[in-house]
Image (tube, rainbow, N blue to C red):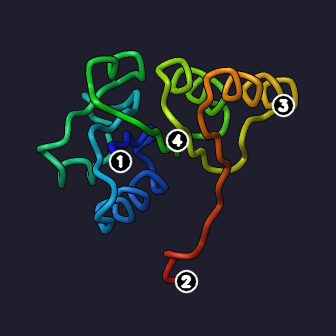
Amino acid sequence: MNVVIIGAGTLGQRWTQIVNSSTNAKIQAFVDPLIGNEKAPAWLLQYPEIPKFNSIPELRDLQVEAAIITAFSPAHAEAVEQALAQNYHVLVEKPFVTNQADAKRLVQLAGQKKRKLMVSQNYRFFPG
């Protein structure tokens, strides 16, 4: 499965390690609004071969089936909506969104698009 990591903070770095350890998934791109400026996370430099973008709409020409959203919580609703709009399955770190109206709307959108939408806080691969 071709995936994109949306959010290049600590959780994005951890999910990158997990996806890279899988034989069934491959990272096609990273998305973070800080990419391209001095505040971009340094760990992204370890992956020069993976394209990097500032926004989800820039991914439209890539072959991607799923998005892993690790952005900061207030950005979840918009990121989930944009990923579903591009027909991606979505795994989003908790909290899903910051209000119930967004939650209901996005669950309904995932159903309309026939896409999986999953909320995760999984410590299975966390060494602690």
Tell me the distance, in whole angstroms, between the alpha carbons under discs 1 and 3: 30 Å
**Which amino acid, by three-letter code, is at mark 3?**
Asn
**Residue 69, label in figure:** 4
From the viewer's perspective, tell me whether residue 3 is left or right of residue 108: left
Q: Regarding mark 1 in the picture, which secondary structure is present there? A: loop
| 116 lies above or below 114 | below
Per the image, the residue denoted by label 2 is 128
The residue lying furthest to the front in this view is 114
**Quarter where residue 114 is shown:** top right
**Residue 99, label in figure:** 3
Mark 1–mark 3 contact, CB under 8 Å?
no
Tell me the distance, in whole angstroms, between the alpha carbons under discs 3 and 4: 17 Å
Q: Regarding mark 2 in the picture, which secondary structure is present there? A: loop
* Tag nearer the camera, 4 or 2: 4
Mark 4–mark 2 contact, CB under 8 Å?
no
Near-viewer residue (105 or 99): 105
Tell me the distance, in whole angstroms, between the alpha carbons under discs 4 and 2: 22 Å
Label 4 or label 1, whichever comes before in sequence order = 1
Give the image location of residue 76, x and y in percent: 63, 33
**Which amino acid, by three-letter code, is at mark 4?**
Ile
Mark 2–mark 1 contact, CB under 8 Å?
no
**Residue 12, label in figure:** none
From the viewer's perspective, tell me whether residue 55 is left or right of residue 11: left
Q: Regarding mark 3 in the picture, which secondary structure is present there? A: loop
Q: Residue at the location (53% across, 37% down)?
A: 89
Image quadrant holding the C terminus, namely bottom right
From the viewer's perspective, tell me whether residue 41 is left or right of residue 50: right
